[in-house]
Image: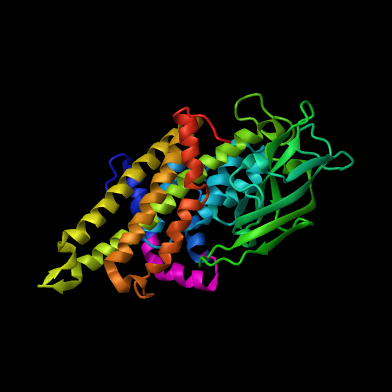
Amino acid sequence: MSTVLETEEHKALRAAVAALGKRFGRDYSTGLARKGEHPRELWEEAGKLGYLGVNLPEEYGGGGGGMAELSIVLEELGAAGSPLLMMVVSPAICGTVIARFGTEEQKRTWLPGLSDGSLTMSFGITEPDAGSNSHRITTTARRDRGGTSRSSGAESGGEWVLSGRKVFISGVDISDATLIVGRTEDARSGSLKPCLFIVPRDAPGFSRTQIDMELQAAEKQFELVLDDVRLPADALVGGGPSHSSGAESGGEDAGLLQLFAGLNPERIMGAAFSIGMGRYAVERAVEYAKTRTVWKGAPIGAHQAIAHPLAQAHIELELSRLMMQKAAKLYDDGDDTGAGEAANMAKYAAAEACVRAVDQAVHTLGGNGLTREYGLASLITAARVSRIAPVSREMILNYVSHQTLGLPKSY
């Protein structure tokens, strides 16, 4: 696939990650998925080579790049058949939020480990009764003024107590902590506002139950219960009330800003995941169509009924990648508003392209497309997930219709 918008450094990164992905390949990933095991060997190797933290600040062990670089890593691993779903969560969402808004202590504690893969963090936002409506989140955090913990340099006063439930949270069993989105009461207005908390895996009152999924994946899904989970004051991302006067403020006054700073990378990485999967499927179908012969000695790829749909799938993946690159560039340049629109569009386009690419790839192989030998059938369900998570295509269409086109809301 062409890389006309990429620097020489980006092309070199793409080639290096592709080589790593091919060393592991689809058989490695599907084998672990059937056993429900995390691809730890690939994760550790990618971390050791600096790929997992390529977007995080150099002073904390990262590569000093941005979403442009991290999306390349995930796309190429996916195109090799070995995607790492936790890249969407740990370095992209959690690493980005802590790098932009965390206290110095939080950055020193978490970013080096998130960069080299020795630490992993999950992200907890979705709730059973809230669905895609983040305004209905009921997980609450209250102050216990009698607590003794103090955040570094912040007039925060006491511990936090978190209560609530989360659902469809990926990889909690392999994560050292979960970045939980809760809501605190604004003392001035009495309304609830979002805040982000770092909850250690072994925190008392923090429990998890694995969700029985039909989808085979190495990364398990969990329902979480926070039953009066007590956290020190410095568990709040950014410390107490805003710890800086600039735009990159932390604490209680910046929860909404922090949240969207994490969701834009989530959508960009969701697009990268979909594009990588779609590329893998198309490449397998093309290989098959070049060699499979049924009629009069010509390979089936010579027939337009086979060739044209594969060409169309390739075009749609290329177009969605262009939007993903635009979103990454806007985000890395600090244009959060522009990145929000582009990231949603990229995620939508990539998911649609991925579903069609996988469907066409399976159809190209006919019955062979449903066999374990060729490894495409399991992608049918996986590709369908890309339309649902991390945000449904309908919610993206809502976003574009309201934010871009200025149409009124129905809700």
Q: How is the image coloured?
A: rainbow
Q: Nearer the viewer, residue 133 or 324?
A: 133
Residue lying farthest to the left in this orientation: 296
Residue 51 shows in the view:
no
- Where does residue 409 sit, x and y in percent of width and height? 54, 32
Quarter of the view holding residue 366: bottom left
- Where does residue 174 sit, x and y in percent of width and height? 61, 61
**Is the residue 238 above or below the residue 63 in the image?**
above
**Is the residue 398 above or below the residue 46 in the image?**
above
Q: Which residues are magenta?
A: 21-39
Residue lying farthest to the top in this orientation: 245
Q: Is 382 part of what is drawn in magenta?
A: no
Image position of 249 (left or right of 203):
left
Quarter of the view holding residue 190: top right
Which residue lies at the image location 39% right of the left edge and 66% below the top edge? 25
Q: Nearer the viewer, residue 10 or 315?
A: 315
- Where does residue 394 sit, x and y in percent of width and height? 49, 44
Main SS of residues in magenta: helix
Q: Is 38 part of what is drawn in magenta?
A: yes
Which residue lies at the image location 45% right of the left edge and 63% below the top edge? 381
Q: Nearer the viewer, residue 42 or 159?
A: 159
Image position of 349 (left or right of 102):
left
Query: Looking at the rendering, in which quadrant would you find the C terminus?
Result: top right
